[in-house]
Amino acid sequence: MARVFNFNAGPSALPLEVLEEAQRELVDYKGSGMSIMECSHRGKEFEPVLAEATDNLRKLLKLTDDYAVLFIQGGASLQFAMVPMNLLGPGQTADYINSGAWADKAVKEAKLLGGQVNVAGNTAKDIPTRMPAIDGLKLTKGAAYVHVTSNETIAGAQYKVFPKTEAPLVADMSSDILSRPINASQFGLIYAGAQKNLGPSGVAVVVIRKALAEKVAATLPTMLRYSTYIAENSMYNTPPTFGVYMIALVTRWILKMGPETLYRQNADKAGKLYAAIDGNPFYKGTAVKEYRSDMNVTFRLPSEELEDAFVKEASKLGMKGLKGHRSVGGIRASIYNAFPVAGVDALVSFMKDFARRNG
Ligand SMILES: *Cc1c(COP(=O)(O)O)cnc(C)c1O
């Protein structure tokens, strides 16, 4: 079996152990004679899977009873719309921190809906890439919520601390959920597409303080209301059962490894790559140091030709997915939870070798 070092930004690497377990259970899930994909979502096989995925997320995020965990189809991008649809009432203003390509999409979606959107800080086009400084944010008194993107996956910039806001803080944590300790009680709503740190694409995890879902326009369609998912335990319609199953396995894997161990390992992995970048003038980090992402390490080489050669040579050595996002170029090493330390070590030694030969 030849597994590569998968630096893809999303969908991205899953823990090998989890894939092997899913494989073992694929054609006959726990003696049912069916795969979990073929089981009724209301049957005795799937019910404990949904419960485990929910409980594991509750444990890992240390959620109190006033929060609900929801599984919603449509990825993180549907949440760009669902958040304002549910939380931005008539006459209210929502504050958005525009930190890059993903935050910018969230802003655009909120504006489409016709509500008042205040951009409280904007670094979306800054080079080097950075997040808006927290003490410079222009927040609105009485805002419906403040939207923040915890990690800009394309730019490779990340908030290390979050603003303390009076209004509920809503966070897109698609690319760094469960990668480091956070204080969930600081947030009114957290959402994340699963395909970076949690499982396969097509399902978003939403963590919401239940009280926030109560005031919603009577005309909002059923499937677009958080209150539907809360009342029906994410089973108003057929949930993305295989995605939820994979999230259960991935979160079980995190609990088994120990979240603190995983968080330390993530910081170490990023630290090694940034040390390799800073240790050689051949490489240039793309993000301002204080906002460097531990999940998406972005950097440039002296020319685009060298960047192309770097990506091609790395790929031949089994390091895949290092090309930066098409909108920004450069190199991006996405090193989410499941990305192994050995892959980071391999990249570091390739970087040294490549710079020596081409510098
Ligand atoms: C990947 C990503 C998204 C989009 O996720 P989809 O599931 O494709 O909709 C949104 N926000 C961030 C920060 C992301 O990294």
Image: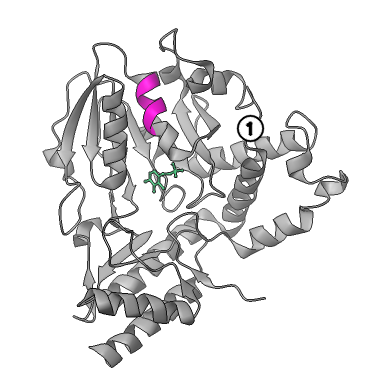
Question: Residue at the spot x=51%, y=18% of the render?
Answer: 227
Total marks placed: 1
Q: Name the residue under label 1.
A: 239
Q: Is residue 309 visible in this depiction of the protein?
A: yes
Q: Residue at x 27, y 33 (%)?
A: 108
Q: Residue 184 vs residue 113: left or right?
A: right
Residue displayed at 81% across by 48% down: 29
Q: Amino acid under label 1?
A: Pro
Whether residue 155 is in magenta: the answer is no
Say left or right for 173 vs 15. left
SS category of the residue bearing label 1: loop
Q: Quadrant of ligand 1?
A: top left
Q: Quadrant of the N terminus?
A: bottom right
| Residue 99 in the image: above or below residue 312 | above
The span shown in magenta is 80-85
Say above or below: 81 vs 163.
above
Classify 325 as above or below 114.
below
Chief SS of the magenta region: helix
Res. 40 image quadrant: top right
Q: Where is residue 106 in the image (x, y as percent from the top left)?
A: 31, 35
Q: Position of residue 128 (x, y in %)?
A: 16, 59
Residue 326 lies, in percent from the top left, at 32, 59
**The C terminus sits in image quarter:** bottom left
User: Dot 1 surroundings within 10 Å: few (below 14), some, or many (20 or more)?
Assistant: some
Identity of the residue furthest to the top in this view: 218
Q: Position of residue 79 (x, y in %)?
A: 42, 32
Task: Look at 47% across and 52% down and name the residue there.
Answer: 196
Residue 190 placement, left or right of 244? left
